Image: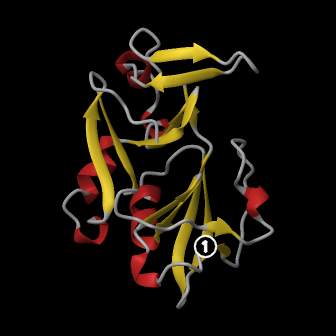
Amino acid sequence: MEFSVISEDFMRSSTAFQCVDSREFFYSTNNYHPTTSESSIKWEDKNIMSSMVHPIADNGDICVTKDLAEIIMSFDPYGVEVYPASLVTKDEEINNRYILAINNIQDVVDFDRSVVEKSPYNGDLIVHRLFLCSDKISRIPFNKRIIYRSKDADTAVFFAPEIFDLIKDDSRFALLRKLKKNTKMRAPKF
């Protein structure tokens, strides 16, 4: 079974956006709270120029371009909140961005192949090497596989391979890290 990873390319991106808006609580939890916002939620990095901003800015949640948001939302993904956003840089404020708050957590870890330990402090699972389970993914309805986080390893965001196929050769998304992987391969944790 295939899955894809689409993210900010941390090897090429030097951004470190922080939310400077009092409405961060709308989207910063793993709980689904349907809300709307007419005005953009602002993220800021005054240490970079606008030309250094990539199609995805990652701050736990992801802030994407309008073009990428439209592609993702055309699939009507389950458990994703979308908020208008802007990115404030040293030289300008970039509009037509959207925060995707991904509250779709799926049980997809293959515990037989992943390297996992239990935290001695709080009992939470710590996943050192992540493998996804083909059987678990195949049982999830398609609308819940469009974009999701993995239960017990929720720092990574996974996408349906169909989204990867739509953007892989599109120059608007050339600066993104884009991977299509099979569940036989190790999955990235971020």
Q: Is residue 91 left or right of residue 41?
A: left
Q: In the figure, 42 relative to 119: above or below? A: below
Image location of residue 135, percent across then percent down: 38, 16
Residue found 19% across the figure and 61% down from its top = 169
Image location of residue 150, percent across then percent down: 52, 31
Residue found 23% across the figure and 70% down from its top = 171
Residue 141 versus residue 9: which sits nearer the camera?
A: 9
Image location of residue 177, percent across then percent down: 32, 54
**Hey, which residue is sitting farthest bottom in the picture?**
91
Q: Which residue is mark 1?
A: 85
Q: In the figure, 179 relative to 46: above or below? A: above
Q: In the figure, 26 relative to 85: above or below? A: above
Image location of residue 178, percent across then percent down: 30, 51
Residue found 44% across the figure and 67% down from its top = 14
Name the image quarter holding the N terminus.
Answer: top left
Asked whether residue 151 appears in the rendered view, the answer is: no
Residue found 58% across the figure and 63% down from its top = 99
Q: Is residue 146 left or right of residue 176?
A: right
> Is disc 1 placed on a helix, strand or loop?
strand
Mark 1 nearby-residue class (10 Å; few <14, some 14–19, many ≥20)? many
The amino acid type of the residue labelled 1 equals Ala
